[in-house]
Amino acid sequence: MKKIFLILVSTSVIGILFSCTKTDDQPDVIVDIKVSKEGYKPDKIYINRGDVVLFRIKAVDEGIGDDYSQEYYGHCFYILPPYDVMVKNIKKGETKQVKVKMVYPGEFIFTCPYCSGIFPTKGIIYVR
Ligand SMILES: [Cu+2]
C-alpha cells in the first residue's frame, strides 16, 4: 500500500516538474503580435490565469537577417521561465504560432534573444 502511494506521489511530482506549458487544447484567447526592429506590437499583453492562449507572431522585417542557410535568422518569440516557450526563426512576412496554457500568475518578459541586444524587442505578459 505504502509503495503504491509513493509511486503515485513520485509520478505526479515528476509530472509537474516536466509538464510543459505548451498545449494542444482549444485556445480561450488569440493574441496577434507583430515583431520588427522597432519591437513587439503590442508589447503589453494581459491574460487571465489558466487561459489557453494562441500566440500568432508575425515578423514584419528580416530581423537579424534573411540568410536562411544560417542557423539563426529572422525574429523569435521567447517567453522567459517558468514558461520557457520559444518560437525561433520567424522569417519576414511569416507568421508562426504557439499555444500556451498560462498557469503561472505574474509578469513575464517575452523577447527576441537574437536581436534584443540591438533592438527594443521586449514585452511583458501580465497574467492575473
Ligand atoms: Cu528579433
Image (cartoon, grey):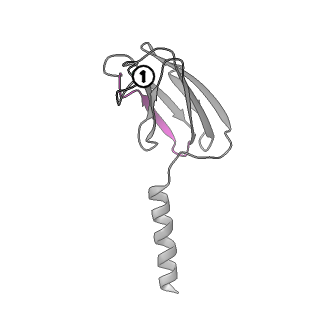
The residue labelled by disc 1 is: 74
* Viewer can see residue 40: no
Q: Is residue 24 visible?
A: yes
Q: Nearer the viewer, residue 98 or 128?
A: 98
Q: Could you tell whether 46 is left or right of 89 in the image? A: right
The answer to whether 45 appears left or right of 78 in the picture is: right
Q: Residue furthest left?
A: 117
Residue range in magenta is 102-115
Q: Nearer the viewer, residue 92 or 128?
A: 92
In the structure shown, which secondary structural element does the residue marked by tag 1 occupy?
loop
Q: Which residue does the image show at 49% across and 38% down from the upper left?
A: 106
Placement of 30 over or under 50, stated as above or below: above
Q: Is mark 1 within 8 Å of ligand 1?
A: yes
85 is higher (above) or lower (below) than 43 = below
Picture quadrant of residue 57:
top right
The residue under the point 45% across, 56% down is 18
Residue drawn at x 52%, y 81% is 4
How far across and down, in percent of the image, does residue 26 sit?
Answer: 68, 43
